[in-house]
Image: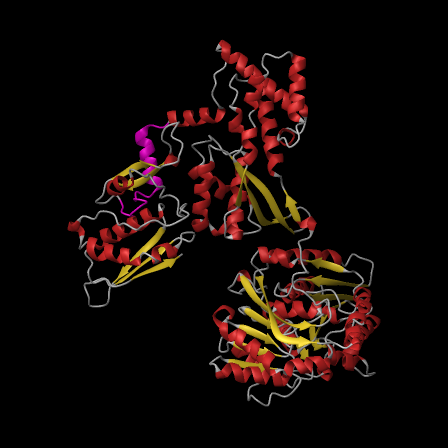
């Protein structure tokens, strides 16, 4: 049983693995690669897949890994997900078993590649016997960090396994299926001849907050390096990394090392929990002593030399770093693969490298995102480089990536959607069910939101997609969308974040939002509006930000009624030529709105008829949308409307927070809303009589929690009745209302006033404002706020006020 929930990409991967490694296939041996970025859960994905296979039929497993850390990670992942199987860890480590301890009935053998290479070279190897015996019924072989497979020793070992086993499934796990040496890249595909069974892009996992985004910081050391022609040719022609003699010089350079240490010390609050990747053991010791000298808790691990400077083992030091007892972990690149410490904030990569794989492995140590336990959205990648006298193609973190084109599902483009909407309107009006023809401008949007979110498509097995779509915004519903988005940014249900949200749940949640925001405009929710609400909410939930709004600046050019009036008296032939010229004008907008000239001319003809019928009084010059609003308003008595507004706002003043107990509430008008059709749920808000009086001249919208101001104004508190100076509830309400008036919206989330024990005075004053409002505006005017509290509210004991942001 899995103890962790699979992420969408892991479900997708297992589906692909099951299709590829199918018992119905004729091949006795199959091999392929599973490519998941570092931090994306390669090990857990493979273990879950293995457990599913074992449950269906008896198969044995050999798991090859490169280091003790990777062995232990594999062991505990398998053990935690299936406690009924026999597992043995084999390596040269004293804590592990020997090859001689292998039994043919063991379910899983976890072994280092180095130990396996030595064992398979012997005639009496227990590992060889295990492979032969269990290879008859089917053996699963996992190679962790499979990009090492092209190395001569590793590839010979894997080929030996294929020779010994009659029936073997071989799966390589890697984040980077490439090789630095181009001549060796071909070996990877010969060993894993099935190619990549499944691959997921790092950017896709970053969009889902499974991985953090890289905050790349490039630092140039004061060191200049001159290469000989021989050294340069070695790097360029043989694709090798920096020569060892130069690495030695860099590692021992005190000026360079001090530069790196000082950078950490200056920015330690930003960097937080940090891993340093260094090159030599003496460099580790230098850094450790320097950091400790400045009060930094640091320690070092390395294999190249016994840790004579510490009584602790590498495992103990890693655990201390994992548990937060250390600020910095220094190591010699042994920590690039398999180490699982999700809350690392920063990695220091202290020199240039030509190895793309090495660079990505080091970067990967900090990329665990919020959903994977990383507690962060961004990871600091600090790259230290030197000045070289020759141009070298160093590995760069920004070259890899990009989301596979097939994963992106572009539902529609803005002008395409506008065009479809206009043609549908044209067709519906050509049915002549009614003689009401809408005002054309009302059918043209003022702009659109562009939405993007991750979804799971279940048509043929699970597949993750990036869904991009457009939500058209019209004059009549602009305020509604703004209000929905503003509220959704702070109070959207968690269910919207799910990539695999079920249709039933989607409908229920969307219906709630329709009832709250749109039921005045529409008698029922149509398919287009349903999708628009879903697009907006899924975008906000997954991106924690509002979708970008694009203004349709060419809207003023879309005056089809003006065109109709211009040529109404022309002959049909003259009208045709006039329209053809208008449609084909360079830079014109009509071909984008009407794909075919026929549709454009038909639309103009309809508005010519509208003008003709209007002269005779046959047609009523009113729009469908205006009619819908009027019908809705006609059916609502004013008393019922006021009652509905108060119920929606929980019978609470949206400005000061006082409820209807002890205060009188009114349904107050909001500035900038459309009152041409009378009062509606959307242009009214609940205020107490005091706040309504204070707001009467301005009519700010307190339903919105984010200010629309671009610069601050002077803080002036609202009038306070001195008979309430001992009523802490009304004091809080006055302060909340004053701050909301300052931001001209419902900016205040909470006002918290607490007192010391055994004291009648409230000393600690703190208020929290919603994100999106500038706290510094009020910080600069704290003296005015404090003066209002002390003199107007007569709370003379108060000395300080704290501002927080939600």
Residue 633: quadrant of the picture: top left
Query: As drawn, which residue projects farthest toward the left?
Result: 723
Depth order, front residue of 3/758? 758
Camera sees residue 316: no
Q: Residue at x 81, y 83 (%)?
A: 124
Q: How is the image coloured?
A: secondary structure
Tell me if residue 132 comes above or below residue 529 in the rendering.
below
Pinpoint residue 497: horizontal percent, then vertical percent.
52, 52
Pinpoint residue 645: horizontal percent, then vertical percent.
34, 37
Residue 39: quadrant of the picture: bottom right
Tell me if residue 704 comes above or below residue 435 in the rendering.
below
Pinpoint residue 659: horizontal percent, then vertical percent.
27, 46
Residue 197: quadrant of the picture: bottom right
Point out the image quarter for the N terminus. bottom right
Point out the image quarter for the C terminus. bottom left
Tell me if residue 20 comes above or below residue 519 in the rendering.
below
Depth order, front residue of 254/626? 254
Query: Residue 588 vs residue 645: left or right?
Result: right
Pinpoint residue 230: horizontal percent, then vertical percent.
80, 77
Q: Residue at x 60, y 23 (%)?
A: 427
Question: Is residue 411 one of those drawn in magenta?
Answer: no
Q: How many marks?
A: 0
Camera sees residue 623: yes
Question: Is residue 648 one of those drawn in magenta?
Answer: yes
Residue span colored magenta = 636-659
């Amino acid at each position: 049983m899995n103890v962790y929930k699979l992420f969408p990409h892991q479900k997708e991967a297992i589906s692909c693995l099951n299709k590829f490694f199918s018992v119905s296939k004729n091949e006795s041996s199959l091999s392929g690669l599973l490519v998941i970025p570092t931090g994306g859960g390669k090990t857990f994905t493979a273990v879950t897949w293995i457990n599913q296979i074992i449950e269906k039929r008896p198969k044995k497993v050999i798991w090859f890994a490169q280091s003790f850390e990777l062995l232990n990670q594999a062991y505990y992942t398998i053990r935690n997900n299936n406690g009924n199987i026999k597992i043995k860890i084999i390596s040269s480590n004293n804590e592990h078993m020997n090859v001689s301890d292998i039994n043919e009935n063991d379910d899983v053998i976890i072994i280092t590649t180095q130990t396996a290479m030595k064992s398979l070279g012997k005639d009496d190897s227990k590992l060889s016997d295990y492979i032969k015996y269990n290879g008859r019924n089917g053996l699963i072989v996992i190679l962790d960090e499979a990009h090492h497979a092209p190395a001569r020793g590793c590839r010979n070992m894997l080929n030996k396994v294929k020779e010994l086993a009659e029936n073997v499934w071989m799966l390589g796990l890697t984040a980077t299926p490439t090789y630095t040496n181009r001549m060796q890249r071909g070996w990877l595909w010969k060993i894993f001849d099935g190619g990549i069974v499944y691959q997921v892009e790092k950017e896709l996992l970053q969009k889902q907050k499974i991985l953090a985004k890289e905050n790349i910081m490039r630092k140039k050391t004061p060191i200049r390096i001159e290469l000989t022609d021989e050294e340069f040719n070695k790097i360029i022609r043989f694709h090798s990394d920096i020569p060892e003699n130069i690495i030695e010089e860099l590692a021992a350079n005190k000026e360079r090392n001090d530069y790196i240490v000082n950078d950490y010390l200056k920015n330690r609050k930003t960097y937080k929990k940090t891993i340093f990747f260094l090159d030599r053991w003496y460099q580790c010791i230098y850094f450790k002593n320097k950091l400790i000298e400045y009060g930094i808790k640091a320690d070092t691990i390395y294999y190249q030399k016994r840790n004579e400077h510490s009584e602790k083992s590498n495992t103990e030091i890693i655990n201390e770093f994992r548990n937060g007892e250390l600020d910095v972990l220094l190591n010699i690149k042994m920590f690039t693969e398999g180490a699982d410490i999700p809350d690392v904030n920063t990695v220091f990569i202290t020199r240039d490298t030509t190895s793309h794989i090495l660079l990505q492995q080091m970067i990967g140590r900090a990329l665990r995102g919020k959903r994977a336990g990383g507690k962060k959205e961004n990871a600091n990648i600090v790259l230290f480089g030197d000045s070289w006298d020759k141009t070298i193609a160093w590995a760069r973190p920004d070259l890899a990536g990009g989301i596979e084109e097939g994963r992106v599902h572009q539902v529609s483009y803005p002008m395409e959607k506008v065009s479809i909407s206009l043609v549908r309107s044209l067709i519906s009006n050509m049915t002549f069910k009614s003689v009401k023809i809408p005002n054309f401008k009302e059918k043209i949007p003022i702009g659109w939101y562009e939405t993007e979110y991750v979804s799971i498509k279940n048509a043929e097995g699970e597949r993750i997609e990036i869904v991009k779509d457009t939500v058209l915004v019209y004059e009549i519903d602009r305020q509604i969308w703004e209000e929905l988005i503003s509220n959704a940014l702070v109070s959207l249900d968690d269910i919207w974040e799910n990539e695999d949200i079920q249709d039933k749940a989607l409908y229920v949640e969307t219906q709630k939002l329709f009832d709250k925001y749109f039921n005045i405009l529409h008698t029922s929710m149509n398919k287009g509006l349903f999708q628009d609400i879903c697009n907006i909410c899924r975008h906000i939930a997954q991106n924690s930000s509002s979708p970008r709004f694009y203004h349709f600046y060419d809207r003023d050019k879309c005056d089809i009624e003006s065109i109709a009036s211009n040529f109404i008296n022309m002959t049909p032939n003259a009208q045709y030529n006039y329209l053809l010229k208008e449609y084909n004008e360079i830079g014109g907008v009509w071909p984008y709105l009407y794909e075919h000239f026929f549709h454009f001319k038909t639309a103009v003809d309809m508005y010519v008829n509208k003008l003709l019928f209007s002269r005779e009084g046959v047609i009523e010059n009113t729009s469908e949308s205006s009619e819908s609003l009027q019908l809705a308003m006609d059916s609502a008595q004013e008393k019922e409307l006021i009652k509905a507004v108060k119920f929606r706002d929980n019978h609470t003043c949206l400005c000061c927070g006082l409820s209807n107990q002890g205060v009188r509430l009114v349904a107050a008008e909001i500035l900038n809303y459309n009152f041409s059709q009378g009062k509606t749920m959307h242009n009214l808000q609940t205020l107490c009589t005091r706040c309504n009086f204070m707001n009467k001249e301005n009519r700010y919208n307190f339903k919105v929690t984010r200010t629309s101001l671009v610069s601050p104004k002077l803080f002036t508190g609202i009038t306070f009745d001195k008979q309430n100076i001992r009523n802490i509830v009304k004091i809080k309400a006055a302060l909340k209302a004053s701050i909301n008036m300052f931001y001209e919206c419902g900016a205040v989330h909470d006002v918290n006033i607490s007192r010391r024990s055994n004291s009648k005075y409230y000393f600690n004053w703190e208020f929290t404002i919603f994100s999106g409002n500038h706290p510094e505006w009020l910080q600069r005017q704290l003296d005015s706020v404090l003066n209002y509290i002390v003199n107007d509210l007569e709370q003379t004991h108060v000395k300080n006020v704290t501002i927080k942001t939600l």
